Image: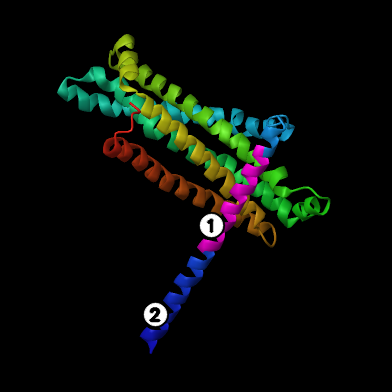
Amino acid sequence: MPDSRILTRSLGLIGRNGIALLRHTSSVWWLLMETLRWVLHRARRRRLLGDGAILRQMEEIGLRSLPIIALIALLIGVILAMQTFFQMKRLGAESLIGGMVAVALTRELAPLLTALVVAGRVGAAFTAEIGSMKVTEEVLALETIGINPVGFLVAPRFLAMTIMLPALTVFAVVLGIMGGWALGAGNFGMSTGGYFDSARDSLVLKDFVSAGVKSVVFGWIIALMACYRGLIVEGGPEEVGRGTMEAVVSSMVLIVVADFFITGLFYYSFYLFKVPIL
């Protein structure tokens, strides 16, 4: 009997969690469709960036994230150069360090780390702001006066994230490559021309396309999860804090999962189907 009760409870827990996952997935999908509909509507009216709310969100996401992104990118570039130098020195291939740093940053580290930092910094702010509006019934007030909360609260943040996260990723790539060059030229006696020639020759179009797709998808994940968690907050201020934590954690997990699938999609498709992006 005890074993059967444990099994019943376990199956019930799995079933409830599965149903909740399906409900959240369908709700986030609906939110994405509504947000895209609003963005396309504004694009048709040629007012895509004519709203001050979008520009304010772009400033919050982009300009105010620059210092921390710059610090992390520089340090990652230095660490990559340091790690690769001692390994490549054994093989007499120090000239390849610039290419290794550039490829690692562009393909993987810059999009991923930038998204994780923005998810922790900006995503948490999105959820806290919208969640606070939800518990104080400001979202209900918007609906009462005929303003669509998705168009007013979610879409500006979604569009701003779609624009600014790729821009921050490019910034992180450049700063990371410069950080690797500073260490190599300053401490290891590497030539500046050789470092940047190696970086230029190693990067191909596939790397830039992969980084661009990843940064856009990561931006969508951050914006949707942060706004969705804010919109479903129920209760008091303590629920806002819980919703913010759940938004950040779920965003980070989904970013890593999406990174896995996008990387596999790009590289396996290139090798298996010979997609001509080289």
Query: Distance between the Cα atoms at labels 2 and 1?
Result: 27 Å
Q: Magenta part of the protein: which range?
A: 21-40
Q: Is residue 23 magenta?
A: yes
Q: Is residue 239 magenta?
A: no
Examine the rendered structure and indicate whether residue 64 appears above or below residue 37. above
Residue 92 on image: x %, y %: 17, 19
User: Mark 2 near mark 1, Cβ–Cβ under 8 Å?
Assistant: no
Q: As rendered, which of 11 and 194 lies closer to the eye?
A: 11
Left or right for 123, reference 95 = right
Q: As rendered, which of 218 and 173 lies closer to the eye?
A: 218
What element does badge 1 sit on? Answer: helix
Name the amino acid, label 2. Leu
Residue 257 on image: x %, y %: 41, 48
Q: As rendered, which of 189 and 132 lies closer to the eye?
A: 132
Q: Which residue bears the numbered disc 1?
A: 25
Q: As rendered, which of 258 and 237 lies closer to the eye?
A: 258
Q: Which residue bears the numbered disc 2?
A: 7
Examine the rendered structure and indicate whether residue 2 appears above or below residue 33. below
Name the amino acid, label 1. Thr
Residue 225 on image: x %, y %: 56, 49
Quadrant placement of the N terminus: bottom left
**Residue found 58% across the figure and 31% down from its top:** 163
- State which mark lies toward you, 2 or 1: 1
Quadrant placement of the C terminus: top left
Asked whether residue 235 is in view, the answer is yes
